Image: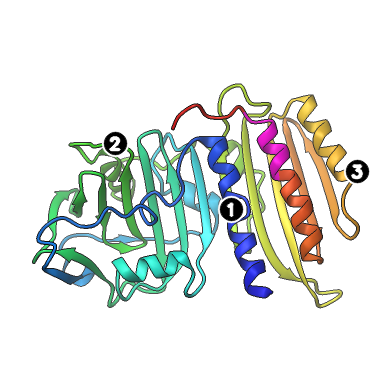
Amino acid sequence: MQEEKSKWVKYGAIFAILIMVGSGVFVGLMYWDGLTGDENATIEYPFADVPGTHANFTFKNAKDAAQYVPEDVLSINILKVYDNDTIDQTLQTSFPGAEPARLLTASYLTGGLEYVVLESEENVSIVLNGSKPQYEDYEDYNIIFISPYQRVIAGNPLIIASFYNYVADNSLAKKAVDVLAGKSAGSTTLNDILEYADDTETYDEIIVYKANNGSNYEKYYQRSSQYVNMTTFQLAFQLESIILNPNDEMKQAVYDLAENASEGIEFTITEEDNVMKTYVDGADYTSFMTDTNALYKLISDHTKQSTTA
């Protein structure tokens, strides 16, 4: 049961969010292209042999993460990675020796950037078809060519740049390097909502995004976590939800949902200026799922759905 709880907290909101923002999560890892070169000559190329500067930073939460991703980001998603889950297995296949701790995905109109925080960069390799990787030296970072749709930047975090369409110029990967090299500042697009988020490292998933035009709100933030209630010493669940600039109809819908909460589930709602903040807490897994899924549906119902494929 504990494994199933972890999976829910981690994946419960993602697929609803995809429809809202019209952009993909796991752009690189789940749609890994396969590598160029001689398909019969697969090798493992050590990151230690990749010349130049490697990525080297970490982040505590979405507030920290935003300063490392390029401007114009549509959404940021952070997931805790568990041993032998889908993300871990996919990484181990393409990057032997990698022990991922967290995955940050930043989505853009043209593609996505994934930052995989590793336990250590030491002993990590990349699986290649051929003898050596193809590099593009940019600001002393060697961007590894995977396909016309993907690039990799070695380091910790490991960075995967993916593009929705064929591109001759890996501009998204270069923008990521610009931030790492100090040529460009990190994103400020989501700062106005992130300033209201709890400054904590306790989470299984965080997602924050700018809603499509025509929605009943401007931006949304959500943090899900598991913790031990120090009064009852039982495992408990919490969802932190922040809505920026909700209209009256949407605010009333949240209050109505709280009024009809399941037994044992507590909604705590506050309003400050143009921000509505809600905590959902409970120890019963089934009831917590029921009420948080209802909140996801509420957010979706008040979101102008994307018309892009």
Q: Give the residue displayed 64% in from the left and 60% down from the top.
A: 9
How many numbered callouts? 3
In contact (CB < 8 Å): disc 2 and disc 1: no
Q: In terms of depth relative to the viewer, which is nearer, 30 or 133?
A: 30
Q: State the separation of the CA atoms marked 3 and 1.
A: 25 Å
Secondary structure beneath label 1:
strand
Mark 3 vs mark 2, CA separation in Å: 46 Å
Residue 149 in the figure: left or right of residue 260: left
What residue did someone put label 3 on? 259
In the rendered structure, which disc, 2 or 1, sits on the residue that comes first in sequence? 2
The quadrant of the picture occupied by the N terminus is bottom right
Badge 3: residue crowd in 10 Å (few <14, some 14–19, many ≥20)? few
Mark 2 crowdedness (10 Å alpha carbons): few <14, some 14-19, many ≥20: few
Identify the residue at image location x=60%, y=44%: 16
Where residue 287 appears, x then y in whole percent?
81, 59
Badge number at residue 206: 1
CB-based contact (under 8 Å), mark 3 and mark 1 = no
The residue carrying mark 2 is 165
Answer above or below: position of 253 versus 5. above
